[in-house]
Image (tube, rainbow, N blue to C red):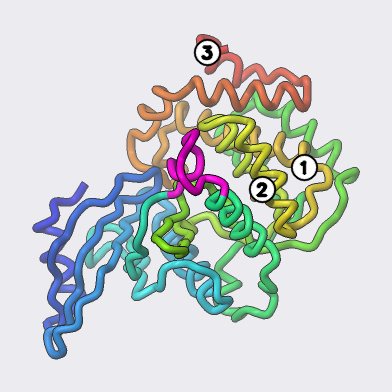
Amino acid sequence: MAQPETLAADLQRYLGQNALVRDVTNLSMGWESDVYGFVLEDVATGHAEACVLRLYFGEHGAYTAGREAAALRLLRRAGYPVPEVMTAESGAAALGRPFLIMGRAQGELLWSPMLLPGAPQAQAHMTRFCGLLAQLHRLDWAALPAAELARLPRRDVAGQLAFLGEIARRYSLAGIDAGMSWLVARQDAVAAVPLGLIHWDFHPANVLFAPPDQYTVIDWTQAEVCDPRFDLAWTLVLVGTQASWDAADRIRAGYAAQGGATTADLDYFVAAACLKRLVSVLIALAHGAERLGMRPSAEAIMTQHLDRMAQVYRRWLEITGLRLAEAERRLAPHL
């Protein structure tokens, strides 16, 4: 993690003599980036603005910076509530790593206000959360600027499975082959739906709430054009294993009530989300999290939460009935 004083000086040099950088503070140390807040003041006018800096990790950091910036610009153009991009750099010359600077969204993360039992306004937050996910999947993405869209992957169900399978093969996760075969064998039976713009990590800790009714969705590093059911399923798996499956069921019902994409064959996509989650953790444990664009040594944090991965694996078993040797070997103490 960079020291605030050093980072302030580097930002000052990058932004130029007409800008004054102050109050640099670390906001979070996430899986894919360090996140800092700072105040940017225009020396000439005295206008000050709260900003956020994301510094990306890993060998894919440059790509991730460009991908997130493109997604944010597209979504702002579509009127979706995301932070405004100020600048993005794929090089490491200025701050030592690729980075993105954006306006700072105000509010608190929605996880506790929405999911803690008895929290005031919990149902109102749940309704809005589901509405934001449904709104995202209804966006007319094809009408958005082609140059920015070109920076986002575009995959149908077959393409997404091929991508996941290629990653598993690249890192020699042979014990996952049976799981991939199960998904591939059933893909043609899945109802076809129009592709949508998806987040791929849409959960209440990536939504900010500021009273009285301002919501902002953050963390768009994995945005792409894909079958929206992958996105919904990923949300259900994360909330189900880190909060409760009852909460996940309420999100599923709320999403349908808000007019999201079809939920036909959703259990298939939940199984795919479980396998994707297992693959990413198994790769990080075997080869290091930085290979996946995550924080160096994030695998140590994952090891502390293998009980959650065991829940993911149990959900996979409930849907498929198929045991995965590699997952059982790694998760044995928690099963």
- The x and y percentages for residue 55 are 31, 56
Tag 1 residue: 266
Dot 3 alpha-carbon crowd within 10 angstroms: few under 14, some 14 to 19, many 20 or more: few
Q: Nearer the viewer, mark 3 or mark 1?
A: 1
- The x and y percentages for residue 265 are 82, 42
> Which numbered disc covers residue 229?
none
User: On the rendered structure, is 6 left or right of 111?
Assistant: left
Residue at 14% in and 70% down: 21
Tag 3 residue: 334
Tags 2 and 1 in contact by the CB under 8 Å rule?
yes
- Tell me if residue 227 comes above or below residue 244 in the rendering: below
Question: Which element carries disc 3, helix, strand or loop?
Answer: helix
> In this rendering, does residue 166 appear at all?
no
- Tell me if residue 143 comes above or below residue 136 in the rendering: below
Q: CA distance from mark 3 to mark 1?
A: 27 Å
Which corner quadrant of the image does residue 39 belong to? Answer: bottom left
| Magenta-colored span | 110-123
Q: Amino acid at mark 1?
A: Leu
Residue lying farthest right? 189
Q: Quadrant of the C terminus?
A: top right
Tag 2 residue: 232
Q: CA distance from mark 2 to mark 1?
A: 9 Å
Verify whether residue 111 appears in magenta. yes
